[in-house]
Image (cartoon, rainbow, N blue to C red):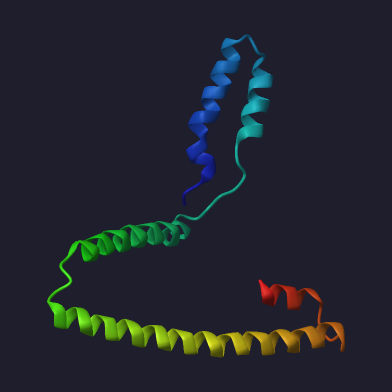
Amino acid sequence: MFSVRSSAMAGVGLVAVVLGGFGCDAAVAQEVQTSLEPAISIPAIWWIAPIGSIIALIFAWVFYKGMMASNEGDQDMIDIAAYVRDGAFAYLKQQYKVVTGFFILVSVILFIMAFVFKVQHEIVFVAFLT
């Protein structure tokens, strides 16, 4: 298990040595060392997701740069790409319309349930908006 405490021990020990060098009492140095030690212990497996996401972002950036540096192709390929792009934007426009309607409908229902019927906490409506 990886511990934030174990990674911070070197810095804490350095603080105790520096305080001891300034003539501080050993008890004071021990108290400072104890107060500086983090109490959070993070399991090592929990680091997989953040590290994996950083690696994925690096790969995405590398692939993006490689794609942008490549040749677009001949005129037919550029025309086909434009048609695909136009179709994708039309699809996204329709999706945004549907999602916006759903969002407004559910927001109104949650608002009525919270403030009119008082069957749920008012924060549910606000939480849904965020």
Determine whether 61 is above or below 86 in the image.
Answer: above
**What number of labels is visible?**
0
Q: Quadrant of the C terminus?
A: bottom right
In the rendered structure, the answer to whether residue 114 lies left or right of residue 98 reads right
Residue 67 vs 120, above or below: the answer is: above
Q: Which image quadrant for residue 65? A: bottom left
Residue 52 % position (x, y): 38, 61
Q: Nearer the viewer, residue 130 or 24?
A: 130
Left or right: 49 as drawn, with respect to 31: left
Image location (x, y in percent) of residue 125: 74, 78
- Residue at 68% of width from left, 20% of height from top? 27
Tell me which residue sits at (47%, 59%) in the image. 46
Q: Quadrant of residue 106?
A: bottom right
As drawn, 122 above or below 33: below
Q: Quadrant of residue 50?
A: bottom left
Q: Residue furthest top?
A: 23
Front-most of 50 and 70? 70
The residue under the point 60% across, 36% down is 37
Looking at the image, which is closer to me, 68 or 40? 68
Position of residue 92 in the picture relative to residue 110 (left or right):
left
Q: Position of residue 4 (x, y in %)?
A: 52, 44
Q: Position of residue 9 (x, y in %)?
A: 51, 33
The residue lying at 51 percent from left, 46 percent from top is 3
Q: Is residue 42 left or right of residue 25?
A: left
